[in-house]
Amino acid sequence: MAQATTETRRLLLADFLRTRRARLSPTDIGLPTGGRRRTPGLRREEVAQAANISVAYYTWLEQARDLHVSRPVLDSLAAALHLSLDERQHLFQLADQPYIQEALERQEQLDPLLQHMLDNQGTSPALITGPACDVVAWNRAFCVVFGDLNKLAMHERNIIWLCFTESTFRQRLGNWQRYAQEALAVFRAKAGHLGDDTRFLQIVDALKQSSQEFRQWWPEHNVRTVTSPYREVEHSLLGHLVFGYMTFQINAYPDLRLCVFLPDPASAAAKKLSALLGAIQNED
């Protein structure tokens, strides 16, 4: 059954490539038309040239040969064939490769409704993370409680990076060691899905250089998929805060997760947080 599924996927990939090739003209990819053509669309050699791969290799793909297509080749083909985001994801699925969007790409293409949803969480800090724990969207409550992400470079907007570096996020976490080890175990579990993803490897390499705790704990290879349902925060203005912590997968974006910190609405700290957020809003 597995072999049949693989063969079917190869046939679908070949057909998909042919249909995407047929809808483009040479001028779409910056090539001269070259006179009249018997069939519409690009020739195989033109796609191969645009994707910087051999004509033979591309021909084998359209012949549904048993090939392991690398992610760089898929990226090149997606660019050469001018695939949309949905088509790019479909291409990777047919090639049996995980599709991982770069943080900048996710942020630029994030549905505005998701940011609207974050902004309407009231006193609940909330954020959206990508596969390698990059933060791609957040709300004002998160910045007030954990530190202003707007002031950070994009490569620093990552939960694991913030947790293991001298950030405001780390400084405000109560019981930091337990949280850091849990977060690292979740991050390690993601490694099996991310494989040789460039962003994942960048984070690991950077933290090996920057954090003694990361260097000590990373080789232990602890993994987990679920963390503690509570988070504690020590805030200079708000005092001791306790949040319920929940995560959700976003159906339209399978590689993104919504994370929400729920304060006890009856606590004095939550009332202070509400007042502080109200004061900040009035200043805008």
Image: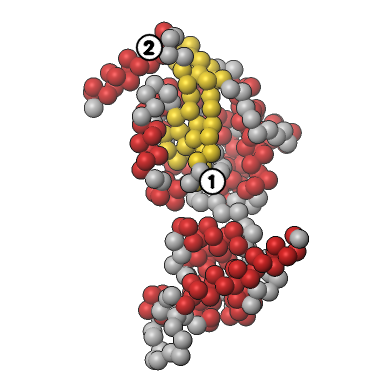
- Against 241, is 133 above or below? below
In this view, the residue farthest toward the top is 268
- Residue drawn at point x = 50 percent, y = 31 percent: 259
- Residue drawn at point x = 39 percent, y = 27 percent: 121
User: Mark 2 near mark 1, Cβ–Cβ under 8 Å?
Assistant: no
> Mark on residue 254?
1
Q: Percent x, y for residue 202?
A: 57, 46
Locate residue 274 relative to residue 235 in the image: left or right. Answer: left
Query: What is the three-letter code of the residue carrying label 1?
Result: Pro
- Against 163, is 205 above or below? below
Near mark 2 (Cα within 10 A), the count class, few <14, some 14-19 or many ≥20, is: some
- Against 217, is 13 above or below? below
Taking depth in this image into account, of 243 and 134 the one nearest to the observer is 243
In this view, the residue farthest toward the left is 283
For disc 2, the marked residue is 271
In this view, the residue farthest toward the front is 1
Query: What is the three-letter code of the residue carrying label 2?
Result: Lys
Q: Percent x, y for residue 135?
A: 47, 38
Q: Earlier in the sequence, mark 2 or mark 1?
A: 1
Locate residue 27 relative to residue 283 in the image: left or right. Answer: right
Locate residue 138 relative to residue 14 in the image: left or right. Answer: left
The answer to whether residue 234 is seen in the rendering is no
Give the foreground label among 2 and 1.
1
Helix, strand or loop for disc 1: strand
Q: Quadrant of the N terminus?
A: bottom right
Q: Quadrant of residue 112?
A: top left
Q: In the rendered picture of this protein, how many numbered marks are placed on residues?
A: 2
- Residue drawn at point x = 70 percent, y = 34 percent: 223
Taking depth in this image into account, of 9 and 89 the one nearest to the observer is 9
